[in-house]
Amino acid sequence: MTTNNPIIDIMQTRHSVRQYDGQPIDRTELNRLLTTAFLAPTALNQQPIRALVIDSPEVRQQLTAATGNTSQLTTSAAVVLFVNDLENRDEAKPFQPAQRPAPTSHQAIGALDVGLVAMQFMLLAKDAGYDTNPMTGFDAAMFNQILNLDPRRYQPLLLVSVGQAAKAGKLAEHKPLSQLVDYR
């Protein structure tokens, strides 16, 4: 369904892709998409999210051991690992004592922040003619090990494959609004 609103059209046509054509995406293009994606809001504007772009076929092949999404990892142009940088929160401008979240909430807040950044990235990629697939079902500890990331500092939260679809994604079945929304 096409509307007169480009952002709605992008949202309605963005579907998860499982098989890509393997064509690379120029790093300048990826940087353009990521620069705009990182304009997403974050809690208290702390900006703890980091992105690791993995375009090396060898490294992506190694990562298949930590996830069941082999085709997305091996056929996409790149995968972007979005992580919560836990030290960022410690190094940031100090909060007022009443505003400082409990330490365990950093992970939950980071998960919300990464969702905002990653969704903007996926919509921007679609607008630029690329397809994406978000993935959460991976072994974060193994990712840290393979990518040589400090697990005390970096919390891998979301992996997004990006590239040109070899096989188009399909609209997933969604629950009706009446099951998702209530008014009071």
Image (cartoon, helix red, strand yellow):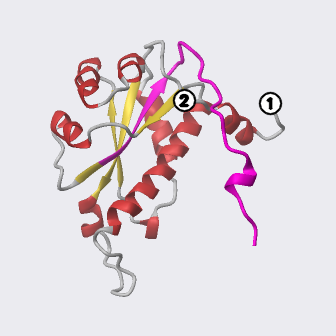
The mark found on residue 99 in the picture is none
Instruction: Rate crowding at label 2 as few (under 14), some (14 to 19) or many (20 or more) other CA atoms within 10 Å.
Output: many
Cβ–Cβ under 8 Å for marks 2 and 1: no
Figure quadrant of the N terminus: top right
| Image quadrant assignment for residue 126 | top right
Whether residue 38 is visible: no
156 on left or right of 125: left
Q: Residue 115 versus residue 47: which sits nearer the camera?
A: 115
Q: Residue at x 67, y 54 (%)?
A: 180
Gap between marks 2 and 1 measured at Cα: 17 Å
Q: Which x, y percent locates residue 4?
A: 84, 38
The amino acid type found where label 1 is placed reads: Met
Helix, strand or loop under label 2:
loop
Q: Residue at x 30, y 69 (%)?
A: 92
The amino acid type found where label 2 is placed reads: Ser
Q: Is residue 66 magenta?
A: no
Whether 87 is drawn above or below 94: the answer is above
The mark found on residue 1 in the picture is 1
Instruction: Rate crowding at label 1 as few (under 14), some (14 to 19) or many (20 or more) other CA atoms within 10 Å.
Output: few
Whether 102 is drawn above or below 52: the answer is below
Q: Which x, y percent locates residue 123?
A: 59, 38
The residue pinned by badge 2 equals 16
| Image quadrant assignment for residue 82 | top left
Q: Which residues are magenta?
A: 156-184
Q: Residue at x 44, y 70 (%)?
A: 44
